[in-house]
Amino acid sequence: MPAHVGCGVVVSQWFMGGQEMPSVIERILDLARWAPSGDNTQPWRFEIKDDRHVLVHGFDTREHCVYDLGGFGSQIAHGALLETLRIAATSYGRRTEVVRSEDAYETRPIYDVRFYQDAQIESDPLLPYIERRCTQRRPFRMHPLTPEEKKALEDSVGNAYTIQWIEGWGGRWAMSKLQFCSAWIRLTIPEAYEVHRSIIQWNARESEDRIPDAAVGLDPLTLKLMRWAMGSWQRVAFLNEYLAGHVLPRIELDLLPALRCAAHFALLRNDEPQGIDDAVDSGRALQRFWLTATQLGLQLQPEMTPLIFSRYVRLGVPFTRFEPATRRAREVAILLERLLAVPPGRAVFMGRVGHGHPPLARSTRHPLDKLLVPSSAE
Ligand SMILES: Cc1cc2nc3c(=O)[nH]c(=O)nc-3n(C[C@H](O)[C@H](O)[C@H](O)COP(=O)(O)O)c2cc1C
């Protein structure tokens, strides 16, 4: 299946199967499922109540994923999904209203989404980029962003957010050091090993529910070595302890890509996020930023681990049984604080952008029918 597929595929399958054409709400959901989520977890299921009403059943992965502290990463993804739903609905002249149910557990939030036909609604200019937007983990070109590109990206996030650019040789070098340091934690703690093992699909260029190994950003030889090492935690621990097995992947996945880009960005909220609604709102801003980058022909890769490990330090929450990593997380927190212009708690997302080739491998998505849950009676 090509990388840029989406609602077209479902529509043609419907046709070929001689079944009924998908409803408008199915088409909207089919497009919206291309929203990004950490490790392609797609933490949402859809309950269609009628053609103008859907319940989005969210969930988070905090129980088993070290990168989802307090469910924050999943909540950002929920926001990205809701924003994508809004944009997708404009293609049918529909306005969207979302209310989060007060009764649901925070770990399993329910978003009540209603669509209204509205003559004022025009097709959103970001609509054509929903399926094209994707994560590129390989190096980009280094020529700087133009003032126009920066302005378009800054404007996309709305008044409650600003963008801090980290650029020039000095900025990119500082970010490379931060990423290199943070990656040491990622590659040495058993808690992250468990996550990586479950989210990489080996020998794949596409993956419906994970990240294909070809999209991770490693050269074929290092990838082979990594695949072998990841067969057991003992192998990883041995390679790390005696052969500095973490160094090569950190250079290839973190240090070099952080140097080879136009700029890094931090998405800053005007105030520190206080709970799920603020996280969801941040996810909405992120998705507008990412789609705008795609519209400008820019590649983007999130760089979230420094934020995540610093947050563990700030909140005093233990995250690993490997004590040296706790100390390293304190270093990451200090480096991040030096880099950011505001208190780190206000940074909700970080990444790098630049011109470059789109990836040859990418995560795809669960087909819509796998994401639908039966509608329960009112
Ligand atoms: C909240 C969040 C955090 C993410 N963190 C990272 C990250 O630290 N590094 C990375 O390479 N990709 C990261 N991603 C990108 C996801 O892995 C990616 O969106 C997902 O696998 C789907 O792939 P696609 O973006 O190519 O459609 C993140 C995405 C989200 C929404």
Image: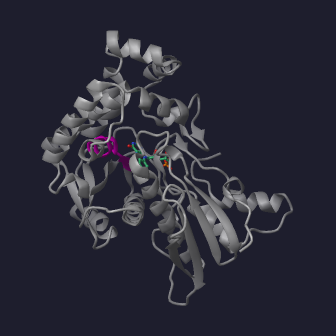
Residue at the image point whose x is 58% and y is 28% from the top: 203
Q: Report the front residue among 320 and 269.
A: 320
> What is the magenta range?
300-310
Q: Is residue 71 left or right of residue 370?
A: left
Say which quadrant the C terminus sits in: bottom right
Residue 28, quarter of the rendered image: bottom right
Say which quadrant the N terminus sits in: top right
Is residue 170 shown above or below 60?
A: above
Residue 192 placed where, x, y %? 42, 32
Is residue 243 shown above or below 322?
A: above
Query: In the displayed image of the protein, which residue is found farthest to the top?
Result: 242
Residue 141, quarter of the rendered image: top left
Instruction: Report if residue 145 is visible in the image.
Output: no
Residue at the image point whose x is 32% and y is 32% from the top: 183
Residue 15 placed where, x, y %? 80, 62
Is residue 187 shown above or below 56?
A: above
Residue at the image point whose x is 34% and y is 38% from the top: 139
Residue 262 placed where, x, y %? 26, 48
Q: Report the front residue among 16 and 258.
A: 258
